[in-house]
Amino acid sequence: MTSDEREKAVAVCDECATICTAWIAPGADAVSISPNTGCDCEESSLRVLDAQTVFGSEELRPASG
């Protein structure tokens, strides 16, 4: 994977719920950027978090207050 093909993203491990930064590339699994900030699971399954995953839609909801 070259730097032109990948993007940084926020991801969560489906096993332990650790949130970390990850590299993502089209058609590839998310990979933790740093072994020191990722989860300690043997077979981590990172899922990319985006606005739709977090808020249930593509649009960001305004902060209430």
Image (cartoon, rainbow, N blue to C red):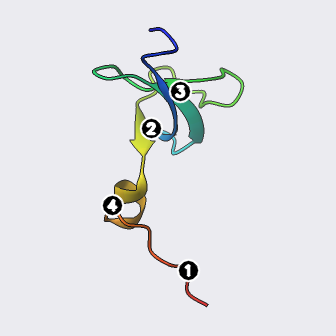
Q: Which residue is mark 3?
A: 41
Q: Quadrant of the N terminus?
A: top left
Task: Identify the residue under disc 1.
Answer: 63
Mark pair 2, 1: CA separation? 30 Å
Rendered view: 38 above or below 2: below
- Crowding at label 1, few (<14), some or many (≥20) Cα neighbours within 10 Å? few
Q: Which mark is residue 58?
A: 4
Disc 4 packing (10 Å; few <14; some 14–19; many ≥20): few
Mark 3 or mark 4, which has the lower sequence index? 3
Closer to us: mark 3 or mark 4? 4
Quadrant in the picture for residue 54? bottom left
Q: Is residue 9 left or right of residue 59?
A: right
* Residue 48: image location, x then y, percent: 42, 40
Marks 3 and 1: which is nearer the front?
Answer: 1
Q: Amino acid at mark 3?
A: Cys
How far is disc 3 from disc 1 in space, using C-alphas? 34 Å
